[in-house]
Image: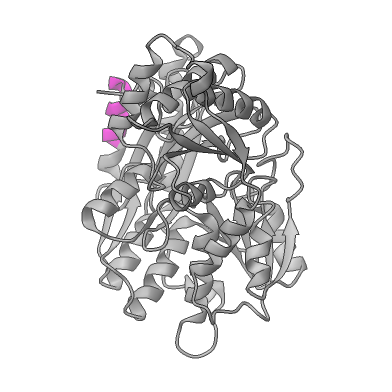
Amino acid sequence: MGQKYFGTDGIRGRVGTYPITPEFCLRLSWAVGKVFAGQDRRARVLVGKDTRISGYMLESVIQSGLASAGADVSLLGPMPTPAIAYLTRTLGADAGIVISASHNPYYDNGIKFFDRHGSKLSDAVEQEIEATLDTFMVCEDSQSLGRASRITDAPGRYVEFCKSCVSSDFSLRGMRIVVDCANGATYGVAAKVFEELGADVVLIFADPDGFNINENCGSTHPENLRQRVVAENADLGIAFDGDGDRLVMVDHEGSIVDGDEIIFGIAQSRKLNKKLKGGVVGTVMSNFGLEKALEGLSIPFLRANVGDRHVLELMKKKKWVIGGEPSGHILTMDLTTTGDAIVAALQVLVAMKSGAGDQQSLKELVTGMHKVPQILLNVEVASPGLVAQSDPMQAAINEQSKVLEGRGRVLVRASGTEPLLRVMVEGDSEVEVKRIAQELVQQALDIALPDKK
C-alpha cells in the first residue's frame, strides 16, 4: 500500500501550502504521539529543527500536537538531522522528529522521523501514522497531557559523539580547513568538532537569519567555498547542506569532490587497510566511473533507487556498511544509523591520514576514480511523475538508451522532494551526452506543455 502523505524522506512542501500548514502538522504530531504511545506509559519524542524561519511556528504546533496526545516532548532547538537520530537512540526516546527541508530554499519545510533506534520509519509505521491521521483528533484529559522540556546540552553531546567516531589518537593538527555550514543546522557544532580535533578552521556561512539557509552556499552551491579554500591556502573545504546530512568537499586546488568520489575514497582506504566489510551501495545516479573504480579494487558494487532510505535498505540486506549518493548522502553504518555529513567528513580525513607514507591530499585520495561525462538537468513541469511514465517519454528513453548501449546510461525520473523531472545522461562522449539530455528535456516539455509546441 502506498503512502498518502509520506514521500521519500518524510513530508515536505512549501510552508503555508498543504500539507506544511499549522493545522496539518498539529494533527500529524498528535497521530505520531498516539502511534508511539506504549500501553502502560506515555511516549517521549525528541524534536529538533534547522534554521528556517518557519521552524518556530512548526515547532510550536508539533509540541502542542504531541502533548495533546499525551506524549512528553524534549526540544533540541537547531540541530543537524543525524544529531537528532543519535540523541533519540542514546536518550531512550520513542521517536525523533526533525523539522527541516534539507537542501531546499527557506520557504519550504518538512517533517522527518526516526524510531527509537535512530533509524527512519518503516513503511508499516508510516502507514499506521497515516491511518491515525484520518481518524477524529481527540485531546487527552488534562491529567494525561504531555509535558515539554528543553535539552540544553544536546550540542555538546553530539560533538562528543562525532569525535568518538575516530580513534583517540587521531589529530588534525597542522591542517587548515574551510567549513561551509550553509547557514543551516550545523552552524553551532561543526566547527567545534574539527577544532577540538586540532584543525585550524575557517568558518563560513554560519550566520543563519531564518531566510539564508542554502542560499548560494552549502553542498548545493560550493562556488564560494572553492574560492575561499584557494584564498586561504587551506588543505580542503567541507560543505554541508541545511540539515547536515549531505556532504560535498573541495580539494586544495579548489576542485569539487562529490559524493561518488567521497565514497570511493573511504572504501578504497578501508579496503587497503583491511577494514572494509562487504561492498558498496550506490544509486542509479552514481557515476559509472565509481562502479569501474571499485571493480578495479575488487569491491562489489550495487545500485539502489534514489534516496538514502533505499540505499540503507539494500545495505542492511547485504550487511554492508558503506553507501551513498552523488549528492553527498554518505552512509557509514558501522558508525551511525543514518547519513551524517560531519561523520562522513571525518572518515575522509581518516582515509587521508591512513595511507602508506605521508598524509595524502584529498586530491590524491580520489585520484583512482575517473568520472565519465554525466549531465543532470532539472525540468520544472506539472506532474513530473506522469510525464516520466508517459508513453512518448518512455519511447524516447528507450531510443536514446539504445544509442548509448554499452557506453552509457539514461535515467529520467520524478524528484521525490521537489516538483521537478530529473533527466540524467552519462556516456563516453560529453558532446553526445549533452545532446541526448537536451533532446529528452525538450521531449518532456512537449509532453507537459503540448499547446506550446
Residue at left 43%, top 50%? 89
Q: Position of residue 66 (x, y in %)?
A: 51, 26
Report the coloring of the rendering.
one colour
Q: Residue 328 vs residue 136: left or right?
A: right
Q: How many marks?
A: 0
Residue 387 versus residue 46: which sits nearer the camera? 46
The stretch in magenta equals 390-399
Between residues 432 and 241, which one lies in front from this camera angle? 241
- Give yes or no for residue 101 being in the magenta stretch: no
Task: State the residue lying farthest toward the front.
Answer: 143
Q: Residue furthest bottom?
A: 357
Q: Is residue 396 magenta?
A: yes
Relative to 299, residue 97 above or below: above
Viewer-closest of 89 and 369: 89
Q: Residue at x 48, y 29 (%)?
A: 71
The answer to whether any part of residue 193 appears in the image is: yes
Where is residue 439 drawn, in percent x and y?
42, 32
Q: Answer above or below: position of 190 versus 87.
A: below
**Residue sitting farthest toward the left:** 318
Q: What's the residue at 61%, 17% (across, down)?
A: 16
State which quarter of the image contains the N terminus.
Answer: top left
| Snapshot quadrant of residue 232 | bottom right
Above or below: residue 336 compared with residue 102: below
Instruction: Depth check: give the residue in front, 404 or 108.
Output: 108
Left or right, 434 with respect to 100, comes to left
Q: What is the magenta segment's predominant secondary structure? A: helix
Instruction: List x then y, in percent, for residue 234.
Output: 70, 71
Where in the figure is residue 228, as x and y percent of width and height?
A: 74, 61
Can residue 406 be spotted in the picture?
A: no
Left of 267 or right of it: where is 148? right
Res 371 → quadrant? bottom left
